Amino acid sequence: MTEYTTVSIPKDLATRVDETIEGTSFSSTSDLVRFLLRSIVIQHQKEGKLTEAEFEEITGQLRELGYLE
């Protein structure tokens, strides 16, 4: 059985995420966060280590999508 932990995000961000995922295959904010984190971790594992530039590119994309401030 998978164990879970809680991650806190600001309520305004959660609201924006809820609006963003409407009509997508993501059923909740948690689904989206798991997907994003899994994607970052998989990329890191494939490449051995994320460079600063790669990390900045990912965070820039997330910021443009409104997931980061």
Image: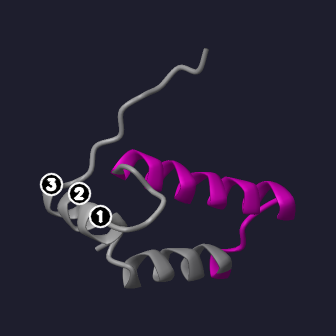
Closer mark to the observer between disc 1 and disc 3: 1
Q: Could you tell me the amino acid type at mark 1?
A: Val
8, above or below 53, in the image: above
* x and y, in percent, of residue 35 in the image: 55, 54
Give whichever of discs 1 and 3 has the lower sequence position. Answer: 3
**Residue position for label 2:** 14
Residue 65, image quadrant = bottom left
Q: Residues within 10 Å of mark 1 (few under 14, many from 20)?
A: some
Residues at marks 2 and 1 touching, judged by CB atoms closer than 8 Å: yes
Please tell me which residue is depicted at 49% across the width and 81% down the height of the picture.
Answer: 61
Q: Nearer the viewer, residue 55 or 32?
A: 32
Question: Would residue 26 appear left or right of 68 to someone viewing this image?
Answer: right
Question: Would residue 56 appear left or right of 27 to someone viewing this image?
Answer: right
SS label for mark 3: helix
SS label for mark 2: helix
Residue 47 part of the magenta-drawn span: yes
Q: Nearer the viewer, residue 37 or 16?
A: 16
Residue 17 is tagged as: 1
Residue 52 part of the magenta-drawn span: yes
Residues at marks 2 and 3 touching, judged by CB atoms closer than 8 Å: yes
SS label for mark 1: helix
Q: Residues within 10 Å of mark 3 (few under 14, many from 20)?
A: few
Q: Which residues are magenta?
A: 29-53
